[in-house]
Amino acid sequence: MHAEVLVSLALRQVDKVFHYNVPSSLAGKVQVGSRVLVPFGRRKVEGYVVGFSPAPNPADLKDVAALLDEGPLFTPHQLALARWMAAYYLCPTVKALRAMIWPLLQVKGPKKVRGLWPAACCEAPDFRRAPKSAAVWQVIQARPGLSRKELAEAAGVSPRVVDAMVARGLLRSEERIESRDPCQDLPEKRIKPPVLHGEQIRAVSKIIEALDQKGGRQVFLLHGVTGSGKTEVYLHAIAAALARGKQAMMLVPEIALTPQMIDIFRGRFGRQVAVLHSRLSDGERYDEYQRLRTGEAGVVLGARSAIFAPLEQPGLIILDEEHEPSYKQEESPRYHARTVALRLAGYAGAVVVLGSATPSLESYCQAVGGGAYHLLELTRRVGELPLPSVRLVDLRRELQEGNKGIFSRDLQEAIARRLSRREQVILFLNRRGYSTLVVCRECGLVLKCPHCDISLTYHVSGRLRCHYCNYSVLAPSLCPGCGSRHVAYLGMGTQKVEQEIRRLFPTARVLRLDSDTVGRRGAHREIVDSFREGEADILIGTQMVAKGLDIPGVTLVGVINADISLYMPDFRASERTFQLLTQVAGRSGRGEQGGEVLIQTYSPDHYAVTCAQNHDYQGFYRREMALRRTLGYPPYTHLARLLVTGRMEKEVQEAADFLAQAVHAAGVPVELLGPAPAPLTRIKDRYRWHLVLKASAQGVLREAATAALDGFSGTGRYRRVQVSVDIAPQSM
Ligand code: ADP
Ligand code: ZN
Ligand code: ZN
């Protein structure tokens, strides 16, 4: 037998299995899932063993040069999933595999430290004349395994005392594995679950029924209004899965994976929970992976990529806020965690729960009218609290009546009222920084990033920043174009809102939550905890304040400008706006005093805004579906996007034209939009053009895209141009 090795080269053409002989020194050690080094041309490259087969001509085969890890890195499930991803998303299998195992590749292995143990002697040594040694002895009896330094510190002696005891054979030193636990500093208080209310009980029992059923995947869509207690449904479902010896995955958007969320899970399931998110160190992530691989942990709580966590047999997969765009990865492999989850559940026969207050149209249409999903509904808030009342403020009227400020008079009054009643306020604006547009009043020059076709954002630090590539420069006092002193700072971000609030309400205590204030580890937690404890009156922030926060003291949510997301050049703009407004409105009125929401907008008649005002998901769904049908957009059609990038605009354009020709030549029934410059025409010095393919079935889309990509790599022209394909793009 010889090994089939998937070789890890970046090129699309080399997503291919090669055959190698397993030398006798490695026989039995090389398994499916092993990472190996193999000769490839004149080089040695990394590869992954994906199978074994009888050799046709064993003499022709080269030997596997080395085995790189002790055990296999991926399971047969994961391999199957990677192969499916490659076919579905048109990405190299190796890329998909790496997305699953990369946490295992970042560090050498478990962290080993030297620890000390009491030597096994028949009787306790006599320390009557050596009080320092006695102190050390006492500590090490209670806490064996401490390091030399820790032990000396705990006993209050110099490390030399410890050394002397080692020399005398009283202590032995040994290597031990130290686990890097990302939740170490969290309190681990067990929390007792509350008694479920009627709708929760119904939802949980349906899920449990499905867990108890043998057979294939079942999918639930849990549609529950904000504050209806969806998390509690997930927790009960996970507990039920664990009780049945099954493993569970809980995915939440990165931004909602807050310390509070982790506390809730650790409080319920203790060390059974492994946590995976982007703020972990490589070592912590490696150790969490190991805990899952060994079965020590049976629940994964994580963001998008946690869908690849190494569970032997997931029985329950939950995606909270299933409509969130952040479930889509925007670089290769360009997968959607929900799509992958549904597939994985198919392999594993798992139950899937998709939850949201504002389900994606894709999911909702599967859950109504004879679709494949089961709909579970939570129609009321916990404790019979009413949903907050929502008022719209027409900013056009405000302007006509001479108010050019950030806050309408209504919103100012509402804030003042809350402050006088010692209630709390959340203000939402989905832009960070101070001023989002810096422009010269004399010559009209807009200050843009030199690397991107994006205007720079002014920050209170005095710097201009590009929010796409992080370029930053000191703000000039004179216009770099004409030297004029009349440079205007237009457009507003959260910093400007904060400044204005401090000016209008000088005694109010204000906190700001956006990616500029949560840079430091632990900062997010501090800000939210502090607000929850009532140490501030007003919390200003970006979408970070829109999701997940459950703070009973908040009786007013103000949306500074609802229109920011409404007029994006994107067919999902209305859906995103409706979702965002509903989510942020849902932060208000979670306590007994009730709550109110004020939405400032220039489009008070837009259905995305009015439906959010009326908590009318069904109404929004009907309007939006009708539009999508008329315009031929998902979920009525399928889309793929080919993005062409390069440093020379002309080459990019020519390559895009070539791809368009190739799509036509493929002769399959797809509609081609473009080629055209992408909405962001340049990022990080690369020009961007795109083509959008539309079809009534997924299969022909892939056929057309594959034909175009193959034609492209076949020409050998446009070597400096890159093409990427995005199946089911989330935005354009
Ligand atoms: P959602 O995710 O649907 O917006 P949450 O899960 O945040 O709602 O729940 C809102 C609040 O209600 C939370 O503080 C939660 O602990 C609490 N809660 C949930 N279910 C119950 C229940 N059955 N009894 C009492 N409190 C509950
Ligand atoms: Zn100028
Ligand atoms: Zn830039």
Image (spheres, rainbow, N blue to C red):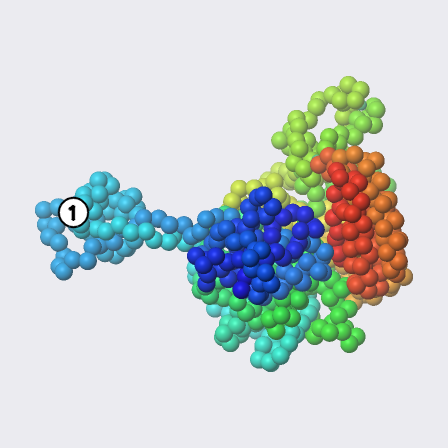
Residue that protrudes farthest toward the top in the picture: 483
Q: Residue at x 32, y 51 (%)?
A: 175
Q: Amino acid at mark 1?
A: Arg
Identify the residue at image location x=71%, y=57%: 89
Q: Quadrant of residue 597?
A: bottom right
Closer to us: 265 or 19:
19
Tag 1 residue: 168
Front residue of 503 and 524: 524
Q: Is residue 148 left or right of residue 264?
A: left
Q: Answer few, some or many: residues within 10 Å of disc 1's Cα (few below 14, many 20 plus, some between 14 and 19).
A: few
Instruction: Please state which of residues 361 and 580 is positioned toward the viewer in this rendering.
Output: 361
Q: Determine whether 486 is above or below 77 in the image.
A: above
Q: Is residue 245 visible?
A: yes
Indicate the position of residue 537 as horizontal and vertical percent values.
59, 47
Residue at the spot 82% in from the left edge and 56% down from the top edge:
704
Is the C-beta of the residue carrying label 1 under 8 Å from the nearest atom of ligand 1?
Answer: no
Taking the image in four quarters, ligand 3 sits in the one at top right
Relative placement, left or right, of 199 versus 662 is left
Whole-percent x, y for residue 189 in the image: 43, 61
Q: Is residue 254 visible?
A: no
> Residue sitting at 46 percent across and 61 percent down?
27
Q: Is residue 314 above or below residue 252?
A: below
Q: Which one is nearer the viewer's eye here, 201 or 124?
A: 124
Q: Is residue 191 left or right of residue 556?
A: left
Dot 1 lies on which element?
loop
Say how many tags the image has. 1
Where does the image place residue 648, in percent across and percent down from the top left? 79, 34
In the figure, is residue 576 to the left or right of 313? Answer: right
Q: Residue 205: image x %, image y %?
A: 60, 78
